[in-house]
Image (cartoon, helix red, strand yellow):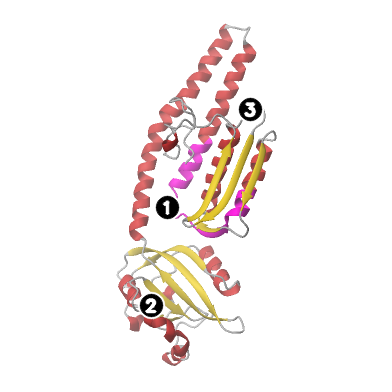
Amino acid sequence: MNSKKFLSPEEIKKYAKDIEPFKAGFDLIDDHVMISDPDGFILYANKGVEKQTGFSAEEILGRNPGDMWGGNMPREFYEKMWDTIKNKKQPFAGEVLNKRKDGVETWQEIRISPVLDEQGNVKFFIGIEPNITARKKQEQEQQEKFREELISILGHQLRNPLTSILWSLELLIKEGGKQNEVLEEIRKRGKDMSALINDLLILSRVETTARLEKENFDLVAETKAVIEKTKKQFPGISFSFQKEDGRFEIFANKTLATQVFSNIIVNAAEYSDKTAGIVKISLNEDADGYLFSCGDNGIGIPKDEQPKIFSRITPKKAAPDSDFLSLK
């Protein structure tokens, strides 16, 4: 971006013919909608921008959002945004923290699309920013609730395997003849505790993050990477992956989404047939979006337990004293 602070009315008028076809439709939209030049200076703002930011049209036109209500995200966020829309000339989506003229903070879901000329150069950008402050507040409340739930389950879910380990050690001391059997039980319970702690750390890290950054990424590539990683963990399991052609692009937190698919695929591998395990994964597109499926040839999940498998604290095993969190 260049060093000037605003566009003059004469400079804005140069774009009038190009942006006029868009204005009629955008004037009817309640959401925050702007058109800006290749350097980010505002050429047009609908009434939604005035309503959400508290700035008047006279204050907005020719200025840069970062000098008024923006500029509150990490530098890396803006670097990625400009690289996407200006250098790569691709749409960008994300969530931004803005500050109104009266100082009140609001959250917007930002979607910016570049409009190109016949030579492929950026003519201007169109940005739509629905207000998601209420949703972000709800997410924060859910995070607080999660922390309370996490604390409440730590005592029970960690106490069970720890008690089993201590009991096994006691038995090992008293009876020297069954050492291998007892040691195997200790090893199993130790692995269970390790897996539980790993799940808890992942959930805690995700749920307590105030700003969960989202981005566009290819679900096919991430699923393939998860499968390759899981193959190394379970060399005796046969994995297959069926998908439709093309990219399956989604807008989400990449780390969290990858962890979800990893948990599901690893769970299938763990509970597949012990002698000839098979895990089948598929990815398809339907009217509602993308459909991810994962199945194995293990014992399966009882029907009465199936509605609960994605609840927050449902065990992976049907047994009530299981030492694992749910698949969620």
**Was residue 34 drawn as part of the magenta stretch in this picture?**
no
Other-residue count near label 3 (Cα within 10 Å), few / some / many at <14 / 14–19 / ≥20: few
Q: Nearer the viewer, mark 2 or mark 3?
A: 3
Q: Circle 3 is placed at which residue position?
A: 274
Earlier residue among tags 3 and 1: 1
- Camera-side residue of 82 and 305: 305
Judged left or right of residue 39, residue 139 is left
* Residue underneath mark 1: 210
Mark 2 or 3 closer to N-term? 2
Q: Nearer the viewer, residue 194 or 282?
A: 282
What is the span of residues highlighted in magenta in the rendered image?
Answer: 198-224
Seen in the picture, residue 246 relative to 277 is either above or below; the reply is below
* 38 sits to left or right of 142: right
Q: Depth-wise, is mark 1 or mark 2 nearer the camera? A: 2
User: Which one is in front in this view, the residue at disc 3 or the one at disc 1?
Assistant: 3
Residue 133 place in picture, x, y as percent = 35, 60
